[in-house]
Image (cartoon, grey):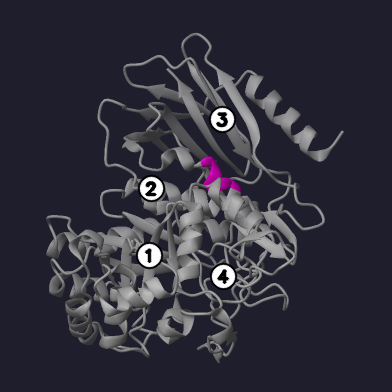
Amino acid sequence: MSVVKRSVLALAMLATAPVFAAVTINIDPAKPGAVINKNIYGQFAEHLGTGIYGGLYVGPKSSIPNTKGWRNDVVGALKALHVPLVRWPGGCFADTYHWRDGIGPQDKRPSNVNGDGVDEINAVGTHEFFDLIDMLGADAYVNGNVGTGSVQEMSDWVEYMTADGGSPLARLRAQNGHDKPFKVAFFGIGNELWGCGGNLKPDYYANLYSNYENFLRAPDKSRPKMIASGGSGFDTAWTDVLSKELKRRTVGISVHQYTIPTGNWSVKGKDIGFKEDEWISTLANTLKMDQLIKDHVAVLDKHDPEKKIGLMVDEWGTWYDEAGARSALFQQNSLRDALVAALNFHIFHDHAERVPVTTIAQMVNVLQAMVLTDKEKMVLTPTYYTFQMYVPFQDARSLPLAIKDNTSYTLGATTIPGMSASAARAKDGKMYLALVNTDPHKAVDVAVDVAGAKVKGAAGKVLTSATMDAHNTFQNPQVIKPAPFSARAEGGKLSIKVPAKAVMVVALEE
């Protein structure tokens, strides 16, 4: 019997076994909360390592099947995630990127060395990016160059992308093959201006932003929503200054927060082959996202009580020590990453009123990727499957949820909640419940109580495995993937057994 079949059989037995609920989840569908913006499931694609070239883009002459140079297998896999938003071209790369290098005939574009000392062939530029956007059916979040650019250069780029036919730059765009304006949903004015974007102070950047934003002119019908580059992690100084100074000039302030097992950027921790202490430390560190958002939202509420400015978490995810020299910032992706993704989703859902956009770093081959590639080979990661399981939460209406008698998971001096949960009413009318069991050893029985309704059952998928670092490889691409799950109510009560170290998403049958 195959490993996958044994896993499915074991999970089916768990679903039908008699259980005695230790944890109760109460959901009140009569008091819906904020809409969970689909854009919190956004993705980030930066010109790093093989994140673009080889991973996503191989060129139209490649023997790897492609459309306009974009890999058919990778694009097809990403389409199944209903990717709502893609941020490009960076990241730190954005503040060394000059957009004119990436337009016109590809064989006449200049090659150069980017800020990370890596050759950039500029085969993927504005037009190619929007080809990808069209294939995915996603919206575009373009990041402009403040660090080494100019107001004029950024103004010209926005005009090139958005202007109608009478503009000289619109005519140049048409000459390069795209008559109609591109649809740019969001435009970021710089990236990490506190660091790689220029080592600036927030007050200085606030003045720069105002100057840049004033000259980023576009027709009203195609003007992007402007995003300001904010601070890093728990540093709220940038949010404080920008939310006070940029009212009515920005729809959001970005913040970046990565999860590393050790808390030490010099020795971050292993991607696989780690011990349990790095399992719990990783989950404990990622749960800090909740307090981070609360800290920034408190500042926003002080200066922006009308809630016109969103907190855009446009870089997040796990960051481990590099796994060999295959490509820059490449790391393997395991079951632990799936739990990290799901726990962050629950936090973003809880703050849906203030967090309208997040983009995980990154789509392919870099950091917490959805997809890994090696030449013609492709493999889907546990993080990919988590995004796929949570698709029903895109634009769903969040529902108030309370966990009673929650378990806890402890190792050494660290203790975290055993169960995490989120509920929403999706656009298809169904009520969905997402569950995470952080304990790598113990299954948890959960009683589901929906106010004013008798739930008949639940059906969906569960992602788990026997080992904490279960991962898919090019040689064994289906070691870990979701398995079907279902449970029936007995005596009017629904109880779900959530396996150890698992992510589960189910639709409740009312």
Q: CA distance from mark 2 to mark 1?
A: 14 Å
Mark seen at residue 262? 4
Q: CA distance from mark 2 to mark 3?
A: 20 Å
Count of numbered labels shown in the rendering: 4
**Badge nearest the viewer, 1 or 4:** 1
Visible residue check, residue 320: yes
Q: What is the secondary structure assignment of the residue under circle 2?
A: helix
Q: CA distance from mark 3 to mark 1?
A: 32 Å
Mark 4 crowdedness (10 Å alpha carbons): few <14, some 14-19, many ≥20: some
Reply above or below: 339 against 48.
above
Q: Which residue is mark 2?
A: 38
- The quarter in which the N terminus is drawn is top right
Q: Are marks 2 and 4 in contact (CB under 8 Å)?
A: no
**Badge nearest the viewer, 2 or 4:** 2
Q: Which residue is mark 1?
A: 141
Q: Position of residue 153 (x, y in %)?
A: 31, 86
Q: Earlier in the sequence, mark 2 or mark 3?
A: 2
Q: Position of residue 213 (x, y in %)?
A: 21, 76
Q: Magenta residues?
A: 385-389
Image quarter of residue 178: bottom left
